[in-house]
Image (cartoon, rainbow, N blue to C red):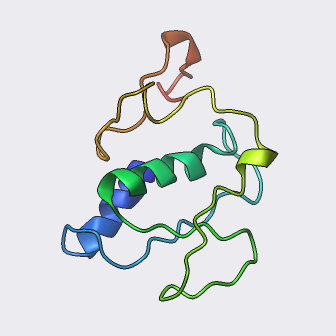
Amino acid sequence: MTPAEGMRAHLDLQGGRPHGVLLPIHWGTFNLAPHAWAEPGEWTKDAGEEAEQPVAFPRPGEPFEPAGILPVEPWWRPLSPALAHPWRLSGEQTGSGRGPAPAARGDLDLAGER
């Protein structure tokens, strides 16, 4: 599930509108994917902002209370190089369901993915 799909699923479960707190899981602790390690966090953060949906980004193992102050700082940025494929185009915003900026053809694998 992509960050945009995760956001859409969360919104669908909330009756189609922002509500509650989205807590993305299964990312940020190690890199097993062909995409940059920080992409899921960055793209989920952007999708949350575009949907006006609160998203919690605790550091791995950090407790928090969903009804309290949410951990929203992008803690991964000092640990990761800048993304080669940003979610948003410079100065533009994509809709939360449209996904990331298109990749150059040379950046696609055999399945047509980054």
Q: Residue at x 64, y 58 (%)?
A: 27
- What percent of the width, then of the height, locates residue 93? 35, 35
Using the rendered image of the protein, determine whether residue 2 is visible from the camera's viewpoint: no
Q: For residue 82, what is the image quadrant?
A: top right
User: In the rendered view, does 27 fall on the left or right side of 110?
Assistant: right
Q: For residue 13, what is the image quadrant?
A: bottom left
Q: Residue at x 31, y 56 (%)?
A: 51
User: In the rendered view, does 59 fall on the left or right side of 98?
Assistant: right
- What percent of the width, then of the height, locates residue 103? 48, 20
Using the rendered image of the protein, determine whether residue 102 is visible from the camera's viewpoint: yes
Q: Is residue 108 above or below residue 86?
A: above
Q: For residue 69, what is the image quadrant?
A: bottom right
Picture mark count: 0
- What percent of the width, then of the height, locates residue 25? 58, 67
**Residue furthest out toward the left:** 15
- What percent of the width, then of the height, locates residue 85? 55, 28
Q: Residue at x 34, y 68 (%)?
A: 10
**Residue furthest out toward the right:** 79
Q: Residue at x 33, y 36 (%)?
A: 94
User: In the rendered view, does 9 fall on the left or right side of 35?
Assistant: left
Q: Is residue 11 above or below residue 105?
A: below
